[in-house]
Amino acid sequence: MIKVYSTPTCSHCKKVKEFLDSINANYVDVDVLKDRVAREEMIELSGQQRVPVISIDGEIVLGFDKPAIINTLDKHNALMK
């Protein structure tokens, strides 16, 4: 499962989602401004309050780090699920 913790005004969040859309990845977008529980979950997982935070089968990628996202997707065969 791919989960993107984001905010509506975050440009890097938009880039992450555009990239995931471009490779036809299924993901859940969580707006941490609206969802307090998700915000707390994101902070617990990442140790930070900055977005985007991407969880790929429980492995965390911080920011729009395209090589790390691709590597983690490949590692978890996340696109095959």
Image: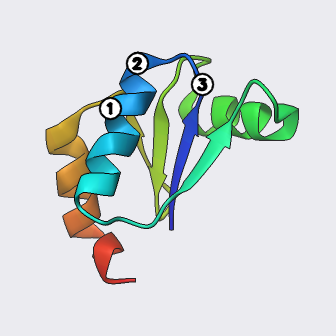
Q: Which residue is mark 3?
A: 8
Q: What's the residue at 24%, 32% (across, down)?
A: 65
Residue 28 place in picture, x, y as percent: 58, 56
Q: Residues within 10 Å of mark 2 (few under 14, many from 20)?
A: few
Secondary structure of the residue carrying tag 3 is loop
Marks 3 & 1, CB-CB < 8 Å contact = no
Q: Nearer the viewer, residue 68 or 13?
A: 13
- At horizontal 30% and vertical 66% (from top left) the residue drawn is 24
**Residue at the extreme bottom of the image, as rendered:** 81
Are the residues tagged 3 and 2 within 8 Å (C-beta)? no
List x then y, in percent, for residue 67: 14, 42
Residue 64 image point, x, y percent: 30, 30
Q: Position of residue 79 (x, y in %)?
A: 30, 73
Inter-mark Cα distance, 3 to 2: 8 Å
Q: CA distance from mark 3 to mark 1?
A: 12 Å
Tag 1 residue: 15
Q: Residue at x 33, y 42 (%)?
A: 18
What residue is rendered at 33% in x and 54% in y? 21
* Residue that numbered label 2 is attached to: 11
Question: Is the residue under label 1 in contact with that under label 2 (CB below 8 Å)?
Answer: yes
The kind of residue tagged 3 is Pro
The image quadrant that residue 61 belongs to is: top left
Q: Amino acid at mark 2?
A: Ser
Q: Is residue 68 above or below residue 65?
A: below
Q: Is residue 29 left or right of residue 77?
A: right
Residue 47's place in the image compared with 24, above or below, is: above
Q: Label 1: few (<14), some or many (≥20) within 10 Å?
A: some
Q: Which of 77/12 is in front?
A: 12
Amino acid type of the residue that numbered disc 1 sits on in the rendered structure: Lys
Mark 1 falls on what kind of element? helix
Is 6 displayed left or right of 30 in the figure?
Answer: left
The answer to whether residue 18 is left or right of residue 27 is left
